[in-house]
């Protein structure tokens, strides 16, 4: 006859097995599957029967499910990679065509390759992070944060190539705050909101450092630079609000 | 010319059984398994791998959805996710049963003539 200790032990082994599912599937159904297995074990225990036969059947049946879901996941991943490679190629057409038409725009091949890698990387980051949650607000928050981060990083690289002032590296610090914040938040909506607010605050600090303390003014009046910084701060804060909305929707 | 509406693809046995189990009300994973077993007079035993894999695909297809997280008074060890049919799921179940009736009618007709 099965005991509570045996039920607990089998449950722990089953939890280890469930970790072999693709991460999104595990996050979505892992808890429910563990609970269902626990219910089945308890039914056996209450009927005064052993658990070995049940555990063997469920473990094999789940193993087949793991193979199936991992195969589907890999196929979907290949499709996502192909789709993002094509989207990045489409976006690359913009500077490629513009370099043919605009006088004085002559990027070397390496810059095109680097730009393609950035487009592809940003697109893949969106595809991988946005599927973490089904809520539209979460997907919109991820998209907004990535686009704002991409433009900020790009503008910083261009500005640094023109001024060669290392103080502008603080803007990469803002991106690092976002990346570290997202990693610490483990992409969970409520904590992602805080990561975005931290990015907005870090950008405001970066503005004070570059414009007020060091006074590195790029082309254009300080007022324009202030508006541009304010715009990025508003974008990151808006992304934070979208994540906040997604977390509240997830609680309902 | 009016576009002819494509007939829905036949459902897999697992999906049909889950739809049937949920047709009388919302249930959690274990509840669905027990209902499937009862509906099939013990002939179909669905494990968690098949059940949750099917539920995942059914949710993507809009056939079922999570209804709520709450405690089952008979199973007091945690909050459970309940699943329920959507309008699309109910329509798919109806269409599949209609298809089955058609197949049965053809089969009975042939058997009556000794084919």
Image (cartoon, rainbow, N blue to C red):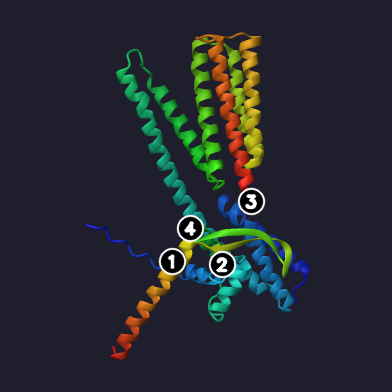
Residue A160 percent coordinates (x, y): 52, 14
Residue B44 percent coordinates (x, y): 53, 76
Secondary structure of the residue carrying tag 1 is: helix
CA distance separating discs 4 and 1: 10 Å
CA distance separating discs 1 and 3: 28 Å
Secondary structure of the residue carrying tag 3 is: loop
CA distance separating discs 4 and 2: 25 Å
The chain under label 2 reads A
Secondary structure of the residue carrying tag 4 is: loop
Q: Residue at x 53, y 9 (%)?
A: A221
Find out whether the residues at labels 1 and 2 contact each other: C-beta distance under 8 Å.
no
CA distance separating discs 4 and 3: 19 Å
Closer-to-camera residue (A228/A25): A228
**In the image, which disc is placed on residue A252?**
3
Find out whether the residues at labels 3 and 2 contact each other: C-beta distance under 8 Å.
no
Residue B106 percent coordinates (x, y): 32, 81
Find out whether the residues at labels 4 and 3 contact each other: C-beta distance under 8 Å.
no
Mark in the foreground, 4 or 2: 4
Q: B75 above or below A67?
A: below
Find out whether the residues at labels 1 and 3 contact each other: C-beta distance under 8 Å.
no
Q: Which residue is mark 2?
A: A61
Q: Residue at x 50, y 9 (%)?
A: A220
Instruction: Respond whether the residues carrying marks 4 and 2 are from the same subunit.
Output: no
Q: Which residue is mark 1?
A: B92
Mark in the foreground, 1 or 2: 1
How many residues crowd mark 1 within 10 Å: few (<14), some (14–19), many (20+)? some
Secondary structure of the residue carrying tag 2 is: helix
The N terminus of chain A sits in image quarter: bottom right
Q: Residue at x 46, y 71 (%)?
A: B13
Find out whether the residues at labels 4 and 2 contact each other: C-beta distance under 8 Å.
no
Q: Which residue is mark 4?
A: B62
How many residues crowd mark 2 within 10 Å: few (<14), some (14–19), many (20+)? some
């Amino acid at each position: 006859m099965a005991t509570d200790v045996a039920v607990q032990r089998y449950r722990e082994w089953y939890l280890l097995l469930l970790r072999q599912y693709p991460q999104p599937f595990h996050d979505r159904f892992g808890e429910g599957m563990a609970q269902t297995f626990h219910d089945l074990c308890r039914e056996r225990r209450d009927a005064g029967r052993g658990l070995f036969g049940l555990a063997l059947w469920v473990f094999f049946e789940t193993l087949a499910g793991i193979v199936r879901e991992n195969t589907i996941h890999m196929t979907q991943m290949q499709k996502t990679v192909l789709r993002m490679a094509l989207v990045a190629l489409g976006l690359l057409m913009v500077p490629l065509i513009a370099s043919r038409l605009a006088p004085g725009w002559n990027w070397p091949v390496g810059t095109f390759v680097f730009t393609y890698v950035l487009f592809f990387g940003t697109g893949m980051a969106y595809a991988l992070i946005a599927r973490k949650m089904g809520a539209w607000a979460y997907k919109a928050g991820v998209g907004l944060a990535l686009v704002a981060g991409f433009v900020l990083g790009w503008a910083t690289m261009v500005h640094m190539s023109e001024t060669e002032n290392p103080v502008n590296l603080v803007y990469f610090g803002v991106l690092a705050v976002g990346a570290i914040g997202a990693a610490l938040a483990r992409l969970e909506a409520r904590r992602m909101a805080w990561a975005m607010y931290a990015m907005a605050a870090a950008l405001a600090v970066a503005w004070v450092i570059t414009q007020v303390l060091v006074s590195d003014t790029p082309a254009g009046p300080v007022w324009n630079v202030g508006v541009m910084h304010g715009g990025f701060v508003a974008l990151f804060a808006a992304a934070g609000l979208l994540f906040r909305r997604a977390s509240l929707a997830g609680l309902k | 010319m009016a576009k002819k509406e494509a007939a829905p693809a036949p459902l897999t046995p697992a999906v049909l059984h889950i739809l049937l189990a949920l047709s009388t009300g919302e249930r959690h994973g274990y509840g669905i398994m027990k209902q499937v077993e009862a509906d099939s007079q013990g002939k179909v035993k669905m494990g968690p791998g098949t059940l949750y894999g099917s539920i995942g695909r059914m949710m993507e297809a809009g056939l079922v959805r999570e209804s709520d997280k709450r405690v089952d008074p008979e199973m007091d060890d945690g909050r459970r996710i309940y699943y329920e049919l959507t309008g699309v799921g109910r329509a798919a179940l109806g269409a599949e049963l209609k298809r089955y009736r058609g197949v049965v009618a053809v089969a009975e007709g042939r058997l009556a003539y000794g084919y």
